Image (cartoon, rainbow, N blue to C red):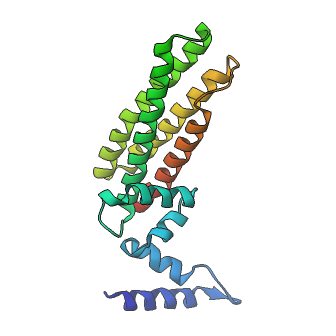
Amino acid sequence: MDDNRLHEYCDNLQIALTYSGKSDIDADYLFSELQPGLLSLADLCRRTDYPALCLDAAKAYGHAYPSPPDAAALLSMHLDMAADHTRTVKAEAEELLSKGKGSPREKGAIDVCNTQFGDAIDDTDTVREAVKGRDAGTANTVLSAIITYYDTCDDAFAEIPLPNPFAKQDDSLSKIISNALALVPIVIS
């Protein structure tokens, strides 16, 4: 079926489900859902929690993927961005640990963060495998766990209480993963 005919069917369904001037569906939205390959980068990013961050991921990592990117490529870009940024913040944690400065409690909190960052990096590969196997449940569960890793780092410092030197990065990384969570159902539909 060609796109014009599909859109005609969507329009007809919208009209059929209209009562008192209001329809239960929007024909254009239904058409876009039925044609995920036709979604533009902007359309895909609007479906995430942080559209500007989504566009940043595409700008920074898009060179490694076919153009224009589809939802699967955009999800991979977010995973690339999260893994790269997590590697950077993990290196910062390792550097702080190697200097040996700070109280034992502060060093303990940094060590907790370092471990959590390592787990987050490892789990981005698990998400890639789950998406490749079309296992949305595993992908969503592991992405949610990754957000929890960043939260655990924040909690380690909240318990001391000392300022978390990784708080800004944890927040940014959580937003990147939140966007990835929003893309999973588009990719695996």
Please say if 23 is above or below 166.
below
- Position of 113 with respect to 62 (left or right) is right
Please say if 54 is above or below 153.
below
- Position of 175 with respect to 120 (left or right) is right
Residue plotted at (61% across, 33% down): 167
Query: Residue 165: image x %, image y %?
Result: 60, 28
Residue plotted at (61% across, 79% down): 24
Query: Residue 170: image x %, image y %?
Result: 56, 36
Query: Residue 96: image x %, image y %?
Result: 51, 19
Total numbered labels: 0
Nearest the viewer among 46 and 99 is: 99
Asked if one can make out residue 188 in the rendered structure from this viewpoint, the answer is: no
Q: Farthest residue toward the front?
A: 99
Please say if 178 is above or below 3.
above
Quadrant assignment for the N terminus: bottom left
The quadrant holding residue 158 is top right
Query: Residue 21: image x %, image y %?
Result: 69, 90
Nearest the viewer among 121 and 13 is: 121
Nearest the viewer among 6 and 152 is: 152
Please say if 167 is above or below 54.
above
Residue plotted at (48% across, 37% down): 146
Residue plotted at (51% across, 10% down): 100
Asked if one can make out residue 76 in the rendered structure from this viewpoint, the answer is: yes
Nearest the viewer among 171 and 180 is: 171
Quadrant assignment for the C terminus: bottom left
